[in-house]
């Protein structure tokens, strides 16, 4: 086979040594004689072999890949806190609606033309304040007429009473008949009835005249006007003139599941006043604090809940009518509870557990029994003692027995128990390992730290944490140097995930 023919088959073949080319040529002549398709099939098979060989050479071994991702450069930085003793509030959460204690649609009591409004929309008013006025002239005239009729009939009554007295003296002298005297008494009684009727007419006219001034029946805020000045209003019209809503105090209606009603009624029947807090939609801002005032007398069978009402002073106006709020009802307070942050609780197949910080800067996984929860505070019924230190940050990268490093907390290191006797050798080994790691990072990883961890000093806690988060993106010089250092015998104790 000529060199020209070889070049046409593939330029890659020219880079193969002469001995291999001769062997390949003879093999090709054999393939041409014995295989269907001759040399074409041979070269296709040879190309597949070369590709597979290149893939095998370039693919990192499983151990190398594992070492690249799982090598360790020091203890894992974690956040910790102490187990404390305190109180836990047992609360019920619910969605509530702000409901005014009184919402009044002010309707006119008499018919007439609306002359003016004495308040502005949105104004705060007190009970008895005049809101609007109706033309009073016709009602004033009716009152004057009733008063005139009353005065006339009062004069007639006075005359009838004088006649009765006069006839009483004359009948004693037998100057007049008893029939005349009896008639005079009846006339006086009749006039008394007429005067009472007239007085009632006067009172009715005076009341109607008073209704021309429309007043607020409750204290609260005036809403939007339902009718404009100049319109003719009628007694008891449906839409009214204006709406007044009582805002101080105000209530919140909410519902709780029927399973919780026993705990609530136990406290209510015991005479305790339960605190109720109202929060905004995001449950981050407390709007107001009130007290439980009423529990409904039956369970809603369609929802399986019981309605409750809580009263709030609402002096600052934080609660607005028909506003949706998140309600937290304080049912009970548990005292002397063992408390940890909720972030310290981890969950696995066997249940809840925490990582406890040991005196030798390692952690131990410990199963716990959970109690009540209050926001970010978790009560521990069993498994922890007050004063122990638990991991709250970084626990997802830990395993039982892993080495950890506790960074400064508010500028002061978190104190742990004194190391046991005989542990100075291991402490020196950890110090040497840390120093070697810092030196290696400073020498081989400065460029990577400047790129991914700008502003962090090589060897610092922040730099090691940043290194752990970005280690897969660091240069091969950096990772190879650290891997070589680890192979020299500086492996971590425990398997709790790599980190600088």
Image: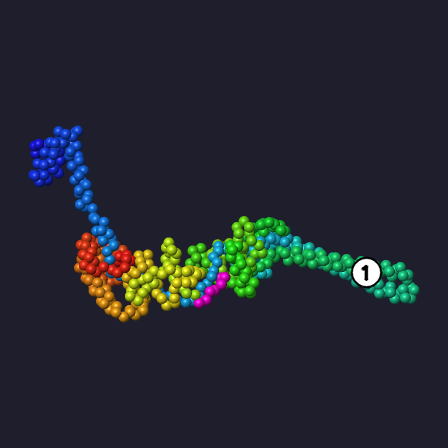
Colour option used:
rainbow
Residue 335 lies in the magenta stretch: yes
Please say if 408 is above or below 3: below
Residue at 17 percent of width and 43 percent of height: 54
Residue 408 picture location, percent across and down: 30, 65
Please say if 316 is above or below 474: below
**In the displayed structure, does residue 6 sit left or right of residue 55?**
left
Residue at 24 percent of width and 52 percent of height: 66
The answer to whether residue 494 is visible is yes
Please say if 47 is above or below 138: above
- Viewport quadrant of the N terminus: top left
Give the image quarter of residue 200.
Answer: bottom right
Residue 154 lies in the magenta stretch: no
Residue 495 picture location, percent across and down: 28, 57
Toward the viewer: 142 or 407?
A: 407
Which residue range is magenta in the image?
330-336
Toward the viewer: 89 or 457?
A: 89
Give the image quarter of residue 26.
Answer: top left
Crowding at dot 1, Cα within 10 Å, few <14 / some 14-19 / many 20+, comes out as: many
Residue at 36 percent of width and 61 percent of height: 366
Residue 147 picture location, percent across and down: 71, 58
Residue 56 picture location, percent across and down: 19, 44
Residue position for label 1: 188
- Viewport quadrant of the C terminus: bottom left
């Amino acid at each position: 086979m000529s060199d020209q023919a070889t070049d046409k088959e593939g330029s890659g073949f020219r880079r193969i040594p002469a001995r291999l080319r001769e062997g390949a040529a003879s093999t090709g002549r054999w393939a041409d004689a014995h295989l269907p398709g001759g040399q074409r099939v041979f070269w296709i098979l040879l190309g597949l072999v070369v590709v597979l060989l290149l893939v095998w050479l370039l693919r990192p071994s499983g151990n190398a890949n594992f070492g690249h991702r799982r090598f360790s450069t020091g203890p894992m930085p974690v956040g910790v806190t102490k187990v404390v003793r305190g109180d836990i509030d047992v609360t019920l959460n619910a969605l509530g609606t702000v409901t005014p204690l009184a919402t009044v649609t002010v309707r006119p009591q008499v018919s007439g033309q609306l002359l003016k409004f004495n308040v502005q929309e949105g104004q705060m008013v007190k009970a008895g304040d005049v809101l609007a006025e109706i033309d009073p002239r016709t009602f004033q005239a009716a009152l004057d007429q009733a008063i005139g009729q009353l005065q006339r009939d009062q004069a007639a009554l006075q005359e009838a009473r004088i006649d009765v007295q006069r006839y009483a003296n004359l009948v004693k002298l037998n100057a007049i008949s008893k029939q005349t005297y009896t008639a005079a008494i009846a006339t006086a009684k009749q006039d008394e009835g007429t005067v009472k009727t007239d007085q009632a007419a006067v009172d009715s006219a005076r009341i109607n005249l008073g209704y021309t001034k429309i007043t607020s029946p409750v204290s609260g805020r005036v809403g939007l006007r339902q009718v404009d000045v100049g319109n003719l209003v009628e007694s008891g019209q449906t839409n009214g003139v204006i709406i007044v809503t009582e805002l101080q105090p105000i209530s919140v209606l909410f519902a709780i599941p029927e399973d919780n009603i026993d705990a609530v009624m136990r406290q209510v029947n015991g005479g305790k006043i339960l605190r109720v807090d109202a929060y905004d939609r995001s449950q981050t801002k407390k709007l107001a604090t009130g007290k439980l005032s009423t529990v409904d007398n039956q369970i809603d069978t369609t929802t399986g809940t019981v309605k409750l009402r809580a009263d709030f002073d609402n002096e600052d106006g934080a609660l607005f009518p028909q506003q949706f709020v998140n309600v937290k009802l304080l049912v009970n307070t548990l005292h002397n509870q063992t408390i940890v942050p909720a972030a310290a609780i981890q969950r696995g197949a066997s249940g809840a557990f925490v990582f406890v910080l040991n005196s030798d800067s390692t952690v131990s996984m410990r199963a716990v029994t959970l109690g009540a929860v209050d926001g970010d505070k978790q009560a521990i019924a069993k498994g922890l003692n007050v004063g122990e230190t638990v991991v709250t940050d970084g626990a997802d990268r830990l395993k039982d027995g892993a080495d950890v490093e506790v960074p400064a907390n508010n500028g002061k290191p978190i104190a742990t128990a004194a190391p046991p006797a005989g542990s100075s050798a291991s402490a020196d080994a950890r110090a040497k390992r840390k120093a070697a790691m810092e030196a290696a990072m400073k020498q081989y990883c400065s460029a990577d730290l400047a790129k991914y961890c700008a502003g962090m000093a090589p060897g610092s806690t922040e730099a090691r944490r940043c290194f752990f988060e970005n280690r897969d993106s660091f240069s091969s010089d950096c990772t190879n140097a650290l891997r070589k250092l680890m192979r020299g015998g500086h492996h971590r104790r425990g398997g709790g995930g790599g980190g600088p």
